[in-house]
Amino acid sequence: MKVARILKTNEPLKIENIDTPKPKGDQVLVKVESAGVCHSDLHLWEGGYAGPQGVFMKVEDRGVKFPLTPGHEIAGTIAELGDSVKGFQKGERVLVYPWIGEGSCPACRAGEENLCDAPRSLGVYQDGGYGEYALVPNFKYLVKLGDFDPSAAASLACSGLTAYTAVKKAAVKDGETLVIVGAGGLGLMAVQITKAITKARVAVVDIGEKNLEEAKKLGADNIINSGSVDPVQAVKDLTKGLGAEAVIDFVNNSKTAPNTFNMLRKRGKMIMVGLFGGSMELNLPLVPLRAFTLTGAYTGKYADLVDLVELAKKGKVQSIVSRRFTLDEANTALEELKARKIVGRAVINP
């Protein structure tokens, strides 16, 4: 089968032909119809994340090994089944839950394999979806799609699930204000999810006018172009000087994070999601004095992915797929994502 592999960080992915794996036991071989192109793929390709004071956090220090077939947003049809698989059959269209754990740590026992102490995530720690086929270790990681479009479904496994987790952590009530920083694929999904499961007011902050216009179309109540106005003051103006009950930062870098912190009202929640990196200096007394909650959100659990797929099937959320690439164009896909040329999401259709 044909795959696009990272042989070495910061070097072009290589298109190779390798043996197609044969599923055994609980394993399932999925013929990939669509693989989402995610910023996490970009960080993997670049070899890591920007840390504080110029420190570069290498993915290899976290246990990632190359060569590797990236791609953790995988949707396709079942090609072959191991002899212990139950409840699935060949030809069924499925979405793959990629955030696989080792199974016995406290997070795994609580159903939160995405927070496993020794993760085995597809497309990160083992081969993923940038190929014609993907081997799924256990059928329990599959979600049935029926007739749902695989290109629209693929990004639900990461950007959609991450946004869903972040919105649930924000826990905004009717009439409260949720600010979403970053109107990329995750931010646009978060707008829809918030409107689907809450009656909160949604304000979106970004520097791209096209992204902001898309956010408005999807239900954002207010849009703020941080390239032309002070976003903190804009949020204060929207909230009668109080600040927002919650802010989700889908960028989370040295520039956005301080602004996110300063947008909060008393008892406000700051949910950090993006991996663009850097650091910020905190006014520490403000955290207890204003009873702020600062937390992170990383992907999500399998049960939430099942719920999210149901929302998508009902038409309450949709993935904005603006670009499609062939497997041979995997490098182009990553380059365009890096250059911010993609509104919403891009997918690879092998």
Image (cartoon, rainbow, N blue to C red):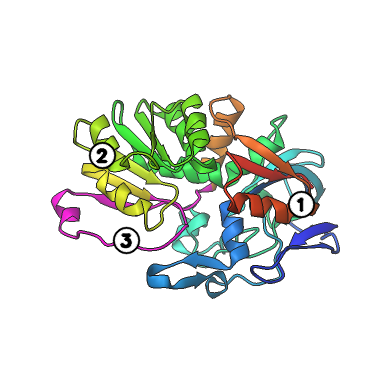
Q: Residue at x 61, y 41 (%)?
A: 345
Query: Answer yes or no: do the residues labelled 2 and 3 have beta carbons within 8 Å?
Result: no
Q: Amino acid at mark 3?
A: Met
335 to 345, vertically: above or below: below
Disc ID at residue 233: 2
Which image quadrant is residue 83 in? bottom right
Q: Amino acid at mark 1?
A: Glu
Tell me if 44 is positioned left or right of 276 in this view. right
Among the two numbered marks 1 and 2 on one chain, the one whose residue lies closer to the N terminus: 2
Residue bearing mark 3: 280
Where in the figure is residue 79, as x and y percent of width and height?
82, 47
Q: Residues within 10 Å of mark 3 (few under 14, many from 20)?
A: some
Q: Which residues are magenta?
A: 272-301
| Residue sitting nearer the eye, 234 or 155 | 234
Residue 333: within the magenta?
A: no
Q: CA distance from mark 1 to mark 3?
A: 37 Å
Which image quadrant is residue 284 in? bottom left
98 to 230, vertically: above or below: below
Residue 296: within the magenta?
A: yes
Helix, strand or loop for disc 2: helix
Among the two numbered marks 1 and 3 on one chain, the one whose residue lies closer to the N terminus: 3
Among the two numbered marks 2 and 3 on one chain, the one whose residue lies closer to the N terminus: 2
Query: Answer yes or no: do the residues labelled 1 and 3 have beta carbons within 8 Å?
Result: no
Tell me if 46 is positioned left or right of 241 in this view. right
Q: Residues within 10 Å of mark 1 (few under 14, many from 20)?
A: some
